[in-house]
């Protein structure tokens, strides 16, 4: 094939190349296409593959022309990628195709290429590690949350108060829409409904109802509803009030294998300390990567960012009508995540830190030991859940950050 690249344009990781294929190459491709078509078609009066070439070309001119075009573009793509030394990460697209008889075939090839990451500097940075202090107040808050899980809800006959669990039937009528009634279970004071509706609920006793105009607050999340007045009807079905258990050794035993309240508090403090350590590790990693990314700029393929935002939209179950807004708002974070992954992959590759199959097997054996389970069962469970790649990635990242921490300075903040 005789071809030439007549124009080259680059924008970040995107490449646009104008390709011209000679008239002779186009003619040869059509001859070969005609031969392939002749073997495939059946023409009355002739045995398969024996019809005269002139008859085949006349009756199947469009099919021959299209097959030749596809073959030419496939071959041109492979040749151009090799000649231009491109490493595409997306399927190429052809635009502005010009395919006229007696003229060269020309088209513009669009693709995204793998970023070239040199990482000129990954050492000599300085980051701060949070102290990760666990206070008595934090322990008390966590214990209260555990205590709240053992709370008992008991029916009340009087008016509800803040903190009560209520069952109500709400219907809202506005100029734009008729009344729509629905039953809700709400905890008053938890911000589940606007304050004005909570006030209506707290006027009632079980079995009562009230109907009154209510103005939607000026800071309501849906901007289109802000400041609008609607008629709200509330019917209160029942009220339940929370009763917390005593904060004593009995509660500790009920919550787990703890003989005393102090043993529970000690376990909570240990868990919070471990969590604080994990958060401090994450903070150090984040700061370090931010500095490395600032010192080493490179382009990333837009398709990688789009794939990541789409994956998060699916994971968060973003409604279809909100996906476009979500993608736009999440794009900076997604791009940073892509850059982060590229840097980690590059360091892992350069320093030979990529997790091996044996590393993954050893990690699974460790997990099985901690759970008191069989290695094969744990492996099968992780494989079924699609988590083997996640474990491999985690091992690789831990190695990369261990390597980086040896070459950069971490200052621990004072408590």
Image: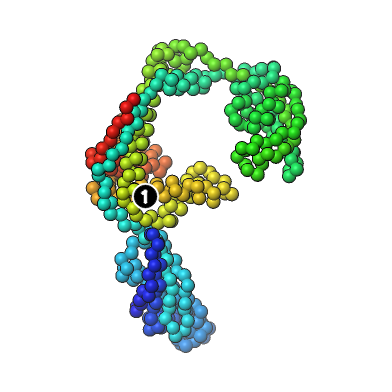
- Whether residue 361 can be seen here: no
Color theme of the render:
rainbow
Residue drawn at the location 35% of the way across and 76% of the way down = 4
Along the line of sight, which residue is nearer the eye, 45 or 299? 299
Q: Residue at x 70, y 35 (%)?
A: 215
Left or right, 188 with reference to 5: right
Q: Is residue 168 left or right of residue 278?
A: right
Q: Residues within 10 Å of mark 1 (few under 14, many from 20)?
A: many
Q: Position of residue 30 (x, y in %)?
A: 42, 81
Say whether residue 261 is left or right of residue 189. Answer: left
- What residue do we see at 62% from left, 42% from top? 222
Front residue (pair 138, 126): 126
Position of residue 335 relative to residue 94, above or below, is: above
| Viewport quadrant of the C terminus | top left
Identify the residue at horizontal 48%, vertical 20% (top origin).
144
Q: Position of residue 49 (x, y in %)?
A: 44, 81
Question: Is residue 328 at all visible to an observer of this figure?
Answer: yes
154, 368: nearer the viewer: 154
Quadrant of residue 208 within the rendered picture: top right
Q: Quadrant of the N terminus?
A: bottom left
Q: Is residue 14 above or below residue 282?
A: below
Q: Quadrant of residue 217?
A: top right
> Which element carries disc 1, helix, strand or loop?
helix
Q: Quadrant of residue 357?
A: top left
User: Across the whole image, how many numbered discs are drawn on residues?
Assistant: 1
| Residue 207, horizontal then vertical, whole percent | 74, 23
The residue that disc 1 covers is 339
413 in relation to 354, above or below: above
């Amino acid at each position: 094939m005789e071809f030439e690249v007549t124009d080259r344009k680059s924008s970040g990781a995107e490449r646009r190349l104008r390709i011209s294929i000679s008239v002779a190459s186009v003619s040869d491709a059509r001859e070969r296409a005609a031969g392939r078509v002749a073997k495939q078609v059946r023409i009355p009066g002739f045995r398969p593959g024996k019809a005269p070439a002139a008859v085949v070309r006349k009756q199947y001119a469009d099919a021959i022309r299209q097959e030749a075009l596809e073959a030419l573009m496939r071959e041109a793509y492979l040749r151009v990628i090799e000649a231009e030394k491109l490493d595409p990460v997306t399927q190429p697209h052809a635009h502005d195709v010009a395919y006229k008889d007696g003229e060269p075939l020309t088209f513009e090839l669009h693709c995204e290429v793998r970023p070239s990451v040199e990482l000129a500097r990954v050492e000599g940075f300085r980051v701060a590690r949070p102290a990760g202090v666990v206070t008595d107040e934090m322990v008390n808050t966590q214990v209260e949350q555990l205590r709240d899980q053992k709370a008992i809800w008991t029916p009340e006959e009087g008016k509800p108060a803040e903190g009560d669990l209520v069952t109500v039937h709400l219907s809202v009528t506005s100029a734009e829409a008729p009344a729509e009634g629905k039953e809700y279970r709400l905890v008053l004071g938890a911000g589940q409904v606007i304050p004005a509706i909570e006030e209506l609920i707290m006027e009632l006793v079980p079995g009562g109802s009230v109907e009154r105009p209510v103005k939607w607050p000026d800071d309501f999340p849906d901007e289109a509803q802000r400041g609008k007045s609607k008629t709200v009807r509330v019917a209160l079905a029942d009220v339940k009030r929370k009763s917390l258990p005593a904060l004593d050794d009995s509660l500790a035993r009920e919550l787990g294998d703890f003989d005393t309240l102090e043993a529970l508090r000690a376990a909570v403090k240990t868990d919070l300390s471990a969590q604080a350590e994990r958060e401090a590790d994450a903070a150090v990693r984040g700061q370090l990567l931010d500095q490395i990314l600032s010192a080493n700029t490179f382009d990333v393929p837009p398709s990688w960012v789009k794939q990541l935002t789409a994956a998060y939209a699916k994971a968060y179950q973003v409604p279809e009508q909100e996906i476009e807004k979500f993608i736009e708002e999440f794009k900076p974070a997604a791009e940073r995540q892509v850059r982060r992954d590229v840097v980690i992959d590059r360091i892992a590759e350069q320093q030979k830190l990529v997790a091996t199959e044996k590393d993954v097997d050893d990690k699974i054996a460790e997990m099985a030991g901690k759970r008191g389970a069989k290695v094969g069962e744990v492996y099968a469970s992780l494989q079924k859940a699609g988590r083997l790649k996640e474990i491999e990635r985690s091992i690789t990242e831990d190695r990369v950050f261990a390597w980086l921490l040896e070459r950069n300075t971490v200052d621990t903040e004072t408590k």
